[in-house]
Image (cartoon, rainbow, N blue to C red):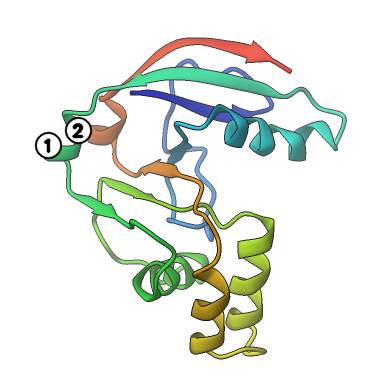
Amino acid sequence: MKVYHGSYDEIKAPDLAHSRKNVDFGCGFYVTPIYEQAEKWCRKFMRKNESGVVSLYDFDEQALSALKTLRFESYSESWLNFILTCRSSNDKSDYDLVIGGVANDKVFNTVELYFDGLIDKAEALKRLKFEKPNLQLCLRSEKALEFLKFEGSVKL
């Protein structure tokens, strides 16, 4: 499967050392099969007058059976709980790979309202059920990164 990573630089050899904490699925290397989503990830760097680069990879789908994987098919209560656990640095799970929806701007606003206690879980889930998930894969282990092969990049 072709996947993309949006950044300020070409990433030929992804690693976990540069992972940020407190993001959707915890520390890991994030990719998406949706090119436009990777472009959106680049925009935050481009707003800071930095380059935007989309790196392209081939992700060996055999990883799905070889890795300990958590997959969310929709924005659900379990997705919301996992996002909140990761964003508050309380994730103790040992998944190699997490697949699911991106907390994009509109979704993120709902998650933040819930996280801050301004809406309850029922209201958050009601709002999220109308959102079509984008897709991201978070490769959270060195073993997972072995299934990723760099193929090139595009500077935006």
Residue 32 located left or right of residue 139: right
Looking at the figure, which quarter contains the C terminus?
top right
Q: Is residue 72 above or below residue 52?
A: below
Residue 55 occupies quadrant: top right
Question: Residue 79: x, y in percent?
Answer: 39, 67
State yes or no: discs 2 and 1 in contact (Cβ < 8 Å): yes
In the image, 137 versus 9, the foreground residue is 137
Residue 112 occupies quadrant: bottom right
Q: CA distance from mark 2 to mark 1?
A: 5 Å
Q: Is residue 1 above or below residue 77?
A: above
Q: Amino acid at mark 2?
A: Ala
Count of number-bearing discs: 2
Looking at the figure, which quarter contains the N terminus?
top left
Q: Which mark is residue 66?
A: 1
Residue at 68% x, 37% y is: 40
In the image, 56 versus 87, the foreground residue is 56
Question: Residue 111: x, y in percent?
Answer: 59, 72
Q: Which mark is residue 91?
A: none
Question: Residue 57: x, y in percent?
Answer: 42, 18
Residue at 66% x, 21% y is: 53
Name the residue carrying label 2.
63
Residue 40 located left or right of residue 69: right
Q: Is residue 58 above or below residue 38?
A: above
Q: Secondary structure at mark 1?
A: helix
Question: Residue 81: x, y in percent?
Answer: 41, 74
